[in-house]
Image: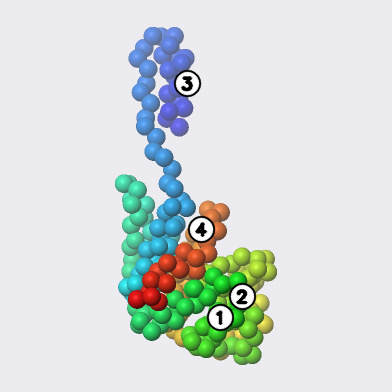
Amino acid sequence: CFNGAAVVYNYSVSWIARTDPIELRALQAPPNLPMLLQLLLDVHGYEIFQLGCFNGDPHPGNILLMPDGRLGLIDYGSCVTLSLEHRKKLARLMVSLLLPTQEEAVQVYSHEMGVKTREMKPHILYKMAAFWYDRDTPDVTGGMNVHSFTEWLHEQDPVTFLPDEYVMPGRVSVLLRGMGAAFGIKIQTAEAWSRHARTLLSS
């Protein structure tokens, strides 16, 4: 890097030849990735639960780190709207996924949101809800990678009906968690979005 070469020059050639040393360049601090990811989660949680209108495709190519440190969000071509009713059901799922037991999340996911599988196995319904809307930790995936886990879910109890309204929020959750995983940062979407979910439910 420039500064490394400058230091070598300043304490060798410049010192011997008694020339003016090269001025070192100011270094910018590296971006605070956990903070930026938290901000992304917060923005999308606000869009989904408070506004009911959000970008369904927040992949890394649609997120810019501006020179002044701000985030730029572009390409809202996959903008999705959710009715208040659908937002409240999704909010109840997010809150239920934070509970130590599975029953309420399964109830919300299947009976309120209307997700159907061939055999309606509760433990499979819970794993589906947890994977798409919260986390991909070993307690959910059994240590399988995403491809193997989704294939396993289909083998165990295939989905027969998934309301369109809930597809894109799940996609957003998975995409944002994938960005975190790329940098070794574990994210639980339900926890990150719980504040916005609870605000909606209490309004």
Please tell me which residue lies in front, 33 or 42.
42
Depth check, mark 2 against mark 4: the one in front is 2
Could you tell me which secondary element the residue under label 1 belongs to?
helix
Query: How far apart in space, not on screen, are marks 2 and 3 (Cα)?
Result: 61 Å
Q: Estimate the x, y position of residue 42 in percent, counting from the top left.
A: 40, 62
Could you tell me which secondary element the residue under label 2 belongs to?
loop
Query: How far apart in space, not on screen, are marks 4 and 3 (Cα)?
Result: 38 Å
Q: Which residue is mark 4?
A: 180
* Direction front: furthest residue: 202
Badge 4 density bin: few <14, some 14–19, many ≥20, Cα 10 Å: some
Query: How far apart in space, not on screen, are marks 4 and 1 (Cα)?
Result: 28 Å
Query: How far apart in space, not on screen, are marks 1 and 3 (Cα)?
Result: 64 Å
Q: Estimate the x, y position of residue 158 in percent, counting from the top left.
A: 61, 85
Q: Estimate the x, y position of residue 93 in percent, counting from the top left.
A: 49, 77
Task: Give the quadrant of residue 53.
Answer: bottom left
Q: Which residue is mark 3?
A: 8
Image quadrant for the N terminus?
top left
CB under 8 Å between discs 2 and 4: no
CB under 8 Å between discs 2 and 1: yes
Q: Which residue is mark 2?
A: 101
In the rendered image, the vertical position of residue 188 relative to residue 31, given as above or below: below
**Earlier sequence position, callout 2 versus callout 4:** 2
Q: Residue at x 37, y 17 (%)?
A: 21
In the rendered image, the vertical position of residue 164 relative to residue 10, given as above or below: below
Q: Is residue 12 visible?
A: yes
Image quadrant for the C terminus?
bottom left
Q: Which residue is mark 1?
A: 104
Q: Residue at x 33, y 52 (%)?
A: 70
